[in-house]
Image (cartoon, rainbow, N blue to C red):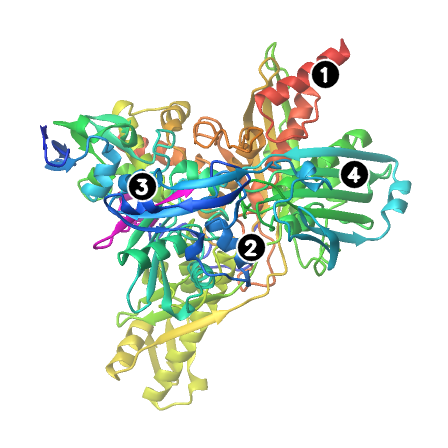
Amino acid sequence: MTTEKQYRVIGTRPVRPDGVDKVTGRAVYGADVTLPRMIHGKILRSPHAHARIRGIDTREAERYPGVLAVVTAEDLPDVDVVLAVGEGGDVNMRDASHNIMASGKVLYQGHAVAAVAAVSPHVALEALKRIKVDYEPLPPVLDVRKAMAADAPLLHEDLFTDTMGQRSEHPSNIASHLIAEEGDIEQGFREASVVVEREFVTHTVHQGYIEPHAAVAEWRDDGQLTIWCSTQGAFSVREQVAQILKHPISQVKVVPTEIGGGFGGKISVYLEPVAALLSRKAGRPVKMVMDRAEVLAATGPTPGTYMKVKVGADAQGNITAAHAYLAFEAGAYPGSPIGAGCTTVFAPYRLKNVRIDGFDVLVNKPKSNAYRAPGATQAEFAAEVVMDEICEKLGMDPLEFRRKNGAKEGDWRPFGPPYTRIGAIECVEAAQASEHWKTPLVKEAGSSRRRGRGVASGYWMNWGGTSSCTGRLNPDGTVALLEGSTDIGGTRASIAMQFAEAFGIAYERVRPQVVDTDTVGYNDVTGGSRVTFGTGYAAYALAKQMQREIAAKLAAIWEVDPESVTVEGDRYSAGDKSVNLVEAANLISEQGQQVVTSVTTTPHNRSGAFATHIVDVEVDVETGKVEILRYTAVQDVGKAIHPSYVEGQMQGGVAQGIGWALNEEYIYDENGSLRNASLLDYRMPTALDIPMIETILVEVFNPDHPYGVRGVGEVPIVPPPAAISNAIYDAVGVRMTTLPISPARLCAEIMAKNSARA
Amino acid sequence: MAISLMSGKVTVSATVNGEPTEWLCEPRETLLEVLRDRLGLTGTKEGCSNGNCGACSVLLDGRLVNSCLVLAVETEGAEITTVEGIRGEKGLTPVQRSFLEEAALQCGFCTPGFIVAATALLQANPSPTEEQIRWWLAGNLCRCTGYDKIVRAVQKAAAEMRGEA
């Protein structure tokens, strides 16, 4: 499917501007920064999931040779501010401060309690062993349902439940209860001829970026603080650090390095304020780099859940009612993506009677954080497995059911205005037309192997946010394009392409750079699938603004009315005068003038992204091992600026979704100790675990963007767990409602089914 | 190898990216630490430091290893090739070029490890099947791409190096 417009640059597949540095090892990531006189910081972490800190004795560590500074929570100021940090939602900065350095209590295993800076990382680690912490262990609560019980151990005695603005009478681990309602579900379920209700459990998973968190901080004697770090949002780091340290934001400069993956997990700060404090104390620049166990145990994974979904449909296959009960583990402080879970759970469907209850629940696990379409994968896993069972009971084709009940422009959605132009139904139709769907699957595959096919849809709402760009016209007619959106997956290319398209020049004549917080205007974080949309929008606006400024300067030189200067591609003309951009740049610089232009834009993004996936699996019924035979991802991408990177986002999201579906989970013992904090035991997919991933790009123009762009990064992680569970049902006839569908879990279900039959 | 009694540090001599190189290090330092922190070769990345992710892949006497699992003092007299040492006659090698052309990287952090591992694969086997590529690269984790475009990039580079493209 293509849009009608013809573009010069958009839709081509050029090499990314930062590519050569990344294949030769020159690109500088967080841990690659080295400064003169730099020393190294390490963090002491709690061995307990829940304990009171009676005291911390750091004297011996302070005396250890080579140690230059030690800090604890006592070095942090009291803060009480709520800050919006984009996709992660609002963050109480007091919680953020206590999360980076425990105050009074530790709330999860791995919670930071002290930090040391020393001449080498080895010396810092030796010194940590000499810090004595006196803990009074408390009973941990690790399961979301147990944490909701009235007699559960409380993480915070001053936390009350907020139910749509109403505060509970007693303190609770339930931070909030959201309710979204439309129509009358009781009436809807009475009208149904089939009703399916099931319970679901999912476990904590991690974003799994390969680069561990890293930061270097230099606090100078005049109070100027510079931080180099790997982050999804340099401006967000600046704000968070300024709030946590109560330091003027104007004195904090953040220099974003290249970022080795984030997926939502590199928005909150962990190391940056600690490195800054150590640097202030030591009078030297301090580098801090997490090891892998710290990344897994003490950054922000995405929550485990308990969910219940009930759906009714009439005999013709129309959904008559839907109810979801979603309880998400926030971890140690409030703020799971429960709002997004509620928004997305039934999003692909047109619903008249619906109720959604969402609970944000504290447990003694690390404070959860955003992970690619945060909250949507869990919620839509539950809903899409129930929809599959409805189809089975009705004897209805699952794609036809999704087409018939598909959401479209004007339909209701929770907590928001009705949908604008969306491509939910177009995705289903493209899936129906795909070669994969039209090719029958041979289900028998030897004595112990069965094959099955499953489908699922998914939705992510996408975000617009604020972006700024600065453009500088060089004397040779090329443009230096300064951006503040850190580039996780090729956005320098996608932004430069939109600029080049709008400015009428070749892609190669734009040199995009990601710069620090002093050099470009404010940018929201790289998250919410927003950069190619939002920063691309800013680049488009910048190109148009630069054209106007060039026209005005030429008008002054030519002594004509600025309105009379016309722009066609890279050619500027007025009457008998006509120059190309190179000539214009020369004329302007000969006058001692420059074109240096900055724009800031905050476009609406009322739309969202839908996807429909098809998967074929082969199940070994003796071992419970699942192999992915074939995978097709269909997605409404609005307009693919650089199709290779759009496909790459889809393939990468699918791979993460496959890992979540089949392997990945945090395994805690009864004391709340994480037992698999390594990449051997927290098993992410390797090249050998997944096949080629076919992509079908559907382009339904997004009316909120000049080129029709939709964010593409997040939605592809949403459908895989449900599609795989549905395919496993098709293969072996068991409904898998717990993630991950590990060989042990699946084998147990197959054996239970066989013994029930016998 | 010479042991200095003063600091407990050891002098090690090896050939790194074709250049004779000598450094002082403690016996507990890994090759990865020495490459990054003592020799300034930060193209080799640390992702896990226990041999699970492959981001620190280098060639040690022509053999693909995780440099986080090698003690630097073990490399006395060895030939070490890091991503910085992978260069073609005209700049990029076919593997590096095909990674760019096929968009086989997103964040780029695992990329040096994949470049080193894929280079080693095509030295050992100029005509690998898809399955052989996936098997060889299974020691390198990538969280961004889903491996699809990486496998295609290796296939394309292999074809080019065989003179087919």
Q: Nearer the viewer, residue A18 or A74?
A: A74
Q: Are marks 4 and 3 in contact (CB under 8 Å)?
A: no
Task: Say which label, 3 or 2, has the lower sequence index.
Answer: 2
Q: Amino acid at mark 1?
A: Lys
How far is disc 3 from disc 2 in space, using C-alphas? 37 Å
- Mark 3 residue element: helix
Q: Amino acid at mark 2?
A: Glu
Q: Are marks 3 and 1 on the same chain?
A: yes
Q: Amino acid at mark 3?
A: Ala
How far is disc 2 from disc 4 in space, using C-alphas? 28 Å
Q: Which mark is residue A202?
A: none
Identify the residue position indicated by label 1 in the image. A753
| Residue A369, percent from left and from top | 54, 47
Q: Which chain is indicated by disc 3?
A: A
Q: Residues within 10 Å of mark 3 (few under 14, many from 20)?
A: many
Q: Is residue A405 above or below residue A558?
A: above
| Residue A431, percent from left and from top | 63, 39
Q: Residue at x 10, y 28 (%)?
A: B1
Identify the residue position indicated by label 4 in the image. A310
Q: Which chain is indicated by disc 4?
A: A
Q: Which mark is residue A87?
A: 2
- Mark 4 residue element: strand
- Mark 2 residue element: helix
Q: Are marks 2 and 1 in contact (CB under 8 Å)?
A: no
Q: Nearer the viewer, residue A212 or A263?
A: A212
How far is disc 1 from disc 4 in space, using C-alphas? 23 Å
Q: Are marks 2 and 1 on the same chain?
A: yes
